[in-house]
């Protein structure tokens, strides 16, 4: 039988908006998101080992239930990074790359023990490094969405 | 403690290429399975149980054992399917070890495979990321940012690579060197996919940049291929052949997902290059194997490294040197086929990645090097003890196996 190299399309959908993996987790996170409207970062602290989760998590890696809401700071440290769009770093450049240059960083906010991902702004790519100190850049209008904390600048 | 000594008495591999259009999945897998039976001098009727594994739905079909079993001689036999992401093949080998070590079965056929060209691997990966991505969208993340953040396995690997490079002093030149070393080894391996004899680091450095710091030349291909291994008791193995490869120990470790926590929550696994789970699994595997000084006692390593930096990073996390020392060890030349501690003599996952099979192919290479069956790529030194590794999940799951030419005393 001859192999036909053709793609057959079948209509279908993937309703991501209806998918909720863990209601408990979403309910906790919504409390943190609500607090963002007041420029407050609320993390959840574990009574067993003291780890602070931001965004909050319904169970700790030590299997205790984190239950103490604590305010964490809007400053932190970069743990990892990469670039998107057109950029240059340490003599490396993405050939022919176009689009808004974005520096994407993983950060740990002071007072928390978890990683969150955002873009680093107002800095040349060459200056980025692991261990660099940053501060969140709050938008003028706070909407209580993750987007509110999706940007940071060097501290 | 294991009730029985466990040994590998046969290894079989199919041809590994990007698109197998001449065979279907069951037929492709049979190439590996039949080669394995032949290698061991056994027949399907001799087999007591089967362990199989591949990625769920990467081929666009699921329950492959339903129709594969008939093709592999597994009807009316115990069969178990294991699927743990990138570590699948390693977990299948662990399954074979457990089945024999426990005393439950004498001869176990382990089968791991992937026929990526039949389906859509990105679709498969999306099922892995669905819970987290869907939650993030609900919580108000701009889809544009999610796209820039990076999709698929490369998106995860770049963050690991950049933090590893900052903490170890590994440079982009080291990444180029790793790729050149592996692809040259692969050129000597009849079962590898990307064979690039004579490839130089300079040529790798000219390949397209995918996302900082990873270039096209630093990344594995998508492969169709299968691997099969026969595990049996030490007692039976000694009757069958002069030089079986003994599996001294297996160990795995599951850690918290890195980068993004479950359903949008924070993860305390804050640096994707730390790989604490690999260190825990390796330490436990060495202890179970009676190895006190892995740096002195391990002769060969097959770390799971689909991305160039991972060969160096996992060499360190497998406790084979101090953290941050792997790049200079690479420079010294000791990781080559004629080196003091050859790494990825098969050409590694960076040269051949039939995902579900890959972590078992690390165990298979370790076994074949010990048995002296590697032909042109057989390493110069005598291999008495080797470590095989697998990595998967949301950069959080590690499997380690230690093999030897002699059973544990």
Image: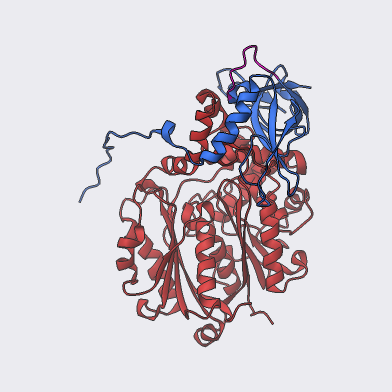
Q: Quadrant of residue A132?
A: top right
* Secondary structure character of the magenta stretch overall: loop
Residue A134 located left or right of residue A31: right
Question: Where's residue B386, x and y in %?
Answer: 65, 67
All told, the count of numbered labels is 0
Residue B275 located left or right of residue B44: right
Q: Is residue B207 visible?
A: no
Of all residues, the one furthest to the left in this rendering is A1
Q: Nearer the viewer, residue B168 or B327?
A: B168
Q: Is residue A85 visible?
A: yes
Chain letter for the part of the structure drawn in red? B
Question: Where's residue B105, x and y in %?
Answer: 47, 79
Quarter holding the C terminus of chain B?
bottom right
- Give yes or no for residue B241 being in the magenta stretch: no
Against B213, is B379 above or below? Answer: below
Q: Quadrant of residue A18?
A: top left
Q: Nearer the viewer, residue B405 or A71?
A: A71
Residue depicted at x 35% and y 62% = B65
- Over which residues does the magenta segment extend? A137-145
Residue depicted at x 56% and y 82% = B234
Against A53, is B32 above or below? Answer: below
Against B143, is B160 above or below? Answer: below
Q: Nearer the viewer, residue B148 or B43?
A: B148
Question: Where's residue B2, x and y in %?
Answer: 60, 78
Q: How is the image coloured?
A: by chain
Against A120, is A79 above or below? Answer: below
Question: Where's residue A151, x and y in %?
Answer: 66, 22
Chain letter for the part of the structure drawn in blue? A
Quarter holding the N terminus of chain B?
bottom right
- Give yes or no for residue A138 being in the magenta stretch: yes
Of all residues, the one furthest to the top in this rendering is A140
């Amino acid at each position: 039988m001859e192999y036909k190299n053709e793609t057959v399309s079948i209509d279908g959908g993937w309703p991501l908006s209806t998918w909720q993996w863990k209601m408990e987790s979403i309910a906790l996170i919504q409390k943190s998101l609500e607090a963002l409207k007041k420029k407050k970062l609320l993390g959840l602290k574990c009574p067993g080992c003291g780890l602070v989760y931001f965004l909050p998590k319904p169970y700790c890696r030590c299997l205790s239930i984190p239950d103490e809401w604590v305010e964490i700071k809007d400053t932190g440290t970069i743990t990892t990074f990469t670039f998107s769009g057109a950029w240059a770093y340490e003599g490396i450049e993405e050939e022919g790359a176009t689009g808004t240059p974005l520096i994407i960083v993983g950060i740990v906010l002071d007072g928390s023990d978890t990683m969150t991902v955002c873009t680093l702004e107002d800095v040349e790519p060459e200056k980025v490094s692991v261990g660099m100190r940053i501060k969140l850049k709050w938008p003028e209008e706070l909407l209580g969405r993750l987007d509110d904390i999706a940007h940071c600048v060097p501290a | 403690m294991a009730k029985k000594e466990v040994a590998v008495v046969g290894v079989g591999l199919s041809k590994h290429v990007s698109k197998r259009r001449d065979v279907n999945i069951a037929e492709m897998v049979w190439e590996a399975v039949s080669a394995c039976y032949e290698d061991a001098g056994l027949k399907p009727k001799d087999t007591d149980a089967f362990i199989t594994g591949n990625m769920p739905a990467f081929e666009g079909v699921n329950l492959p054992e339903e129709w594969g079993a008939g093709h592999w001689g597994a009807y009316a036999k115990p069969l178990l399917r294991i699927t743990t992401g990138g570590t699948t093949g390693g977990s299948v080998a662990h399954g074979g070890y457990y089945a024999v070590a426990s005393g439950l079965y004498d001869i176990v056929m382990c089968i791991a495979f992937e026929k990526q060209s039949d389906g859509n691997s990105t679709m498969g990966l999306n099922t892995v990321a669905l819970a987290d991505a869907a939650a993030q969208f609900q919580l108000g993340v701009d889809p544009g940012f999610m796209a820039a953040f990076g999709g698929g396995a490369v998106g995860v690997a770049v963050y690991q690579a950049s933090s590893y490079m900052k903490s170890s002093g590994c440079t982009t030149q080291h990444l180029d060197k790793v790729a050149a070393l592996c692809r040259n080894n692969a050129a000597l391996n009849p079962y590898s996919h990307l064979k690039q004899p004579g490839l130089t680091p300079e040529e790798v450095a000219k390949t397209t940049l995918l996302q900082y710091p990873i270039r096209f030349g630093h990344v594995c291909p998508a492969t169709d291929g299968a691997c099969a291994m026969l595990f049996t008791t030490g007692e039976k193995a000694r009757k069958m052949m002069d030089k079986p490869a003994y599996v001294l120990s297996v160990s795995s470790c599951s850690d918290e997902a890195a980068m993004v926590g479950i359903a949008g929550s924070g993860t305390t696994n804050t640096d994707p290059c730390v790989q604490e789970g690999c260190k825990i699994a390796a330490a436990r595997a060495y202890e179970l194997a009676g190895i006190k000084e892995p740096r002195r006692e391990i002769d060969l390593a097959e770390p799971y490294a689909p991305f160039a930096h991972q060969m160096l990073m996992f060499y360190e996390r497998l406790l084979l040197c101090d953290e941050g020392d792997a790049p200079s060890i690479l420079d010294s030349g000791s990781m080559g086929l004629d080196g003091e501690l050859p790494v990825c003599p098969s050409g590694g996952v960076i040269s051949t990645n039939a995902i579900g099979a890959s972590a078992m192919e690390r165990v298979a290479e370790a076994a074949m090097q010990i048995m002296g069956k590697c032909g042109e790529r057989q390493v110069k030194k005598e291999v008495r003890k080797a470590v095989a590794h697998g990595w998967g999940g949301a950069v959080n799951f590690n499997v380690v196996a230690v093999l030897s030419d002699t059973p544990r005393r």
